Amino acid sequence: MMVMLEDVKTQPKLEAIIQKEGPLFDVIIIGGGPAGLTAAIYCGRARLKTLLIEKALLGGLASTTFLIENYPGFPEGISGIELGNKLEAQARKAGCDIYYGEATGITISKNKKVVEIEKHRLETKVIILATGTEPKKLGIKGEEELRGRGVSYCATCDGPFYRDKSIVVVGGGNSAVEEAIFLTRYAQKITIVHRRDKLRADKILAERAINHPKIFILWDSEIEEVIGKARVEQVVIKNLKTEARSKLAADGVFFYAGSSPNSKLIKGLVKLDEAGYILTDEELRTNVPGVFAAGDIRKKCLKQVVTAAGDGALAAESARRFIEE
């Protein structure tokens, strides 16, 4: 597990946080990505007694990105880890308590809301759901069997293991192209496999990839199978126009084929769309009073760090008004 400013081993015990803050919180935020951390900053500045719970990595999926180039205020870009660090430091400075752990249940009655974590049942006036997404699994043969042995979903985490190797990147959106470009600092050859005849990524990224001497693109294609014994050795590629199949030697496969919502915890609690994303109104209220949603877990047309941060601010403001009313 990667952490930001504070080692998990040295973080305050949950009992100490409860003893310091009391048994009832104003706001509990579940999820520590850009949306959750921004909500924490705004809640802290409003002097709301706030606890943020994160089960894995502060900064969320953004922290696994080598370089974020489209976040305002950083014309040269900023690494995902550095941005996560800054957001965490700002949330703590605002007075928010942060705890590394996993919320395992939520109970809502007419007069109270309870978040279960470890052996504790924490009461709160408001819950902000910012659980984000996780990389989508294709479910193809060999993907799960070789995960961690050549199959990866994080170039920043695993890229250094592929120095002078051949890599396949699956996908054509911003994440896939950004990470393919990042991997060129290590790999000898990167092959992007994309289902369409042009990249979906921003034009500036697409141009960089197409013109990079280490990057090759297989258009109108998809991966059907990952082959290997101890590690990845080959991939089976199908051309979607001709239906011809071929094998390509590869030392690693990085999947960037979209995301799935982390909504397991909240199924049956709030209204979701057919894909599992939370439905909210313009003030980020769910159908349950006092429960708000922010960031990529929410159904919306653009999932970016900047929109997640905007969601976090608005959810915190809506939470403040709800508590005052």
Image: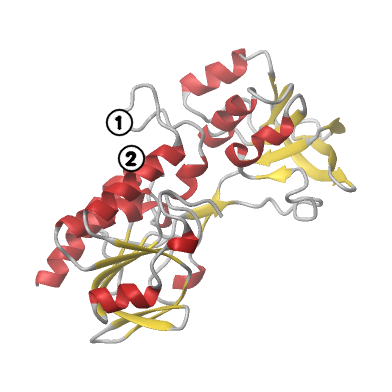
Residue 177 versus residue 281 in the image, above or below: above
**Could you tell me which residue is drawn at 40 percent across and 26 percent down?**
77
Give SS at disc 1.
loop
**Is residue 283 something that shows in the picture?**
no
How many numbered discs? 2
Image coords of residue 129 (percent x, y):
36, 64
**Residue at the disc numbered 1:** 72
Please state if 173 lies on the left or on the right of 183 as rendered: left
Circles 2 and 1, Cβ within 8 Å, touching? The answer is yes
Give SS at disc 2.
helix
* Crowding at mark 1 (Cα within 10 Å: few <14, some 14-19, many 20+): few
Residue 317, located in which quarter of the rendered image?
A: bottom left
Q: Nearer the viewer, residue 80 or 279?
A: 80
**Could you tell me which residue is drawn at 67 percent across and 13 percent down?**
213
**Could you tell me which residue is drawn at 44 percent across and 49 percent down?**
4
Image coords of residue 91 (percent x, y):
28, 53
Mark 2 vs mark 1: which is more N-terminal?
Answer: 1
Please state if 136 lies on the left or on the right of 267 as rendered: right
Amino acid type, mark 2: Val
Badge number at residue 306: 2
Residue 240 versus residue 29 in the image, above or below: above
Q: Nearer the viewer, residue 306 or 273?
A: 306
| Residue at far bottom of view | 110
Amino acid type, mark 1: Pro
Q: Quadrant for the N terminus, please.
A: bottom right
**Could you tell me which residue is drawn at 34 percent across and 75 percent down?**
16
Q: Quadrant for the C terminus, please.
A: bottom left
Image coords of residue 67 (percent x, y):
47, 31
Q: Nearer the viewer, residue 114 or 8?
A: 8
Please state if 30 lies on the left or on the right of 310 as rendered: right
